[in-house]
Amino acid sequence: MTKGDLLLGFMAEACHNAQSHVGDPDAWPSDEDNRQYLLQCTSFQVACFLAQNTVDGEQGVDWCVAIEQLTNNTRREHGMMVRSVKAWRGILRDLVEEYGGWNDDMLTPLAPPVKGKWQAVPDSKVRHVWKCENGDCPNGNPTAKVGPDFYQESGEPMCDSDCLTGMTYVRTEVRA
Ligand SMILES: [Zn+2]
């Protein structure tokens, strides 16, 4: 589990609980303006959560990012018009994706690695080493150290302008 998974769970509970407290069975379906007023703070909270913890969120997140899901419901649960915690997890996960995914901090694992299990690590903790293997390299066959998304953005690293040779992958390094 990552820090992001844990905090998303807390936020899902917060949204569900806010709806539960506002969702009086009689008042809920009738007065949307009143519901908006009562649930504004919760939507602000979701916006701040996204702004602080997602890649694109730092560009700004509209405060009303979750107000519609907070105030409009079609399903009644336990006599109230609230979305389940599970539904909120889905909504928040979609919003995190929409804002470019978790930032590096949220990908930090909370527990020590379990043997044999794959786990997400922040890009900032991984780099790939490439090397020029051109036999006539005028630069003495240098290496390049690049991040995991380098290939997607730019293809294989190139040796400099005198050599212009595509480099060869050597190994991956993880920062402790
Ligand atoms: Zn070279």
Image (spheres, helix red, strand yellow):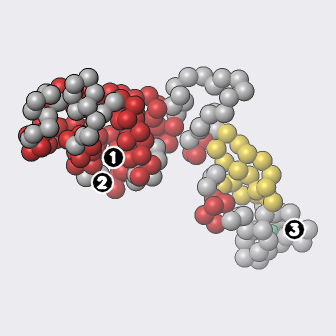
Task: Decide if residue 118 is on the left or right side of residue 25.
Answer: right
Image coordinates for residue 174, horizontal then vertical, percent: 67, 39
Residue behind mark 3: 134
Label 2 beta carbon less than 8 Å to ligand 1:
no
The Cα–Cα distance between marks 2 and 3, rounded to whole angstroms, is 46 Å
The image shows residue 18 at horizontal and vertical percentages of: 22, 30
Secondary structure beneath disc 3?
A: loop
- The residue lying toward the viewer, choosing from 173 and 69, is 69
Q: Nearer the viewer, mark 2 or mark 3?
A: 2
- Helix, strand or loop under label 1: helix
From the Cβ of disc 3, is ligand 1 less than 8 Å away?
yes
Q: Residue at point 22% right, 25% down?
A: 79
| Among numbered discs 2 and 3, the one appearing first in the sequence | 2
Q: Secondary structure at mark 2?
A: loop
Q: Quadrant of residue 157?
A: bottom right
Q: Which mark is residue 60?
A: 2
Tell me the crowding category of disc 2: few under 14, some 14 to 19, or many 20 or more residues within 10 angstroms, Cα based.
Answer: few
Which residue is pictured at 71% across the width and 43% down the height?
Answer: 173
